[in-house]
Amino acid sequence: MATRTVIEVIPARPSRDGDGVAIRRVAGMRHAGLDPFLMLDELQADRREDFGGGFPPHPHRGMQTLTYMKHGGIIHEDSRGNRGEVRGGGAQWMSAGRGIVHSEMPTQDSQGLHGFQLWINLAARDKWSEPTWRDVPAASLVHLDATGVEADAIAGDWSIDGHTVSGPLQQVSASAAVLDLRLEAGHLATVAAAPGETLLAFLYRGSVGAARDPVAAGSTQGATITSGHLLVTSREPADWQVQAGKTGADLLLLRGRPLREPVAHYGPFVMNTVAEIEQAIRDYQAGEFG
């Protein structure tokens, strides 16, 4: 059976954001292979000084964020009066739409943080929609436990080794889906996807051996891929097979429908044209984000 290949492996780069929060980042604002995903941050810090400052109030327009916490807690507050808190195993989703100001601050009892934040693009027709937000506690995630596989579905519908599971978030832009997948050592997993869909995997622990395109730049067929890398798969055919290494593998899987629209990006604003970015800056400076 023909399966997808890994056409690119992108390393996450150490960085800091917010008020000095330590992260590993994969940025792909205009990377066609990541569409509709714009950016992935892994937040991982044990020392309070590496995460305690959090992400003070800042604006967004034209995109969505999805934050998934493995460990520790964060508090969301925004300019529309929303406040929520999510702890280890839970998720937080926000659609910035036409504009919102929000903050994400660690809870005072957090002894270290480990989690992920995704930026997901909005289609041009949705960039002027009303902002929305939702907390998803850990108990609301849908768990899968099968031979060699354990997973938590956060968003969208998934099929792993023929086992189907659906996450509580079903309204994410571009039908984006997110799954936290843990594989036992040596297990070969089959991940279902529709032809033409983007399917990405961020390997955050362990290693995998995945079929790779031998003609892709820097690719070695069958090579081992280690943690801290984003795997970009081909969009044909439908399914993808990935095999865990000797110590197993933990992956954040991302799937979505490519929007194939122009991307103009400046800081926290993601629009389709430079003129729209300039308008976003003027609107924010005029206090029109609430």
Image (cartoon, helix red, strand yellow):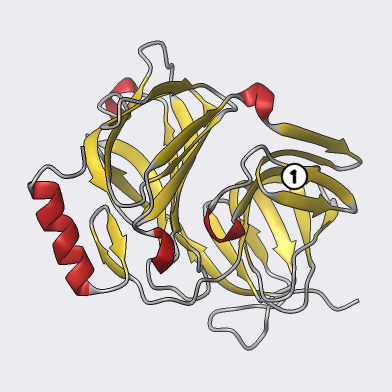
Nearer the observer, 197 or 126: 126
Residue under pointer 1 = 248
Count of residue discs: 1
Residue 280 location in percent, x, y?
Answer: 19, 58
| In this picture, residue 83 sits left or right of residue 53 | right
- Indicate the amino acid at tag 1: Gly
Q: Quadrant of residue 48?
A: top left
Q: How many neighbours does mark 1 have within 10 angstroms: few (below 14), some (14-19), or many (20 or more)?
A: some
Q: Secondary structure at mark 1?
A: strand
Can the viewer see residue 112? yes
In this picture, is 77 found above or below 260?
above
| In this picture, residue 95 sits left or right of residue 227 | left
Residue 80 location in percent, x, y?
Answer: 30, 31
Can the viewer see residue 73? no
Q: Residue shown at 67%/49% (left/top)?
A: 156
Identify the image quadrant of the N terminus: bottom right
In this picture, is 137 found above or below 186?
above
Nearer the observer, 249 or 233: 233
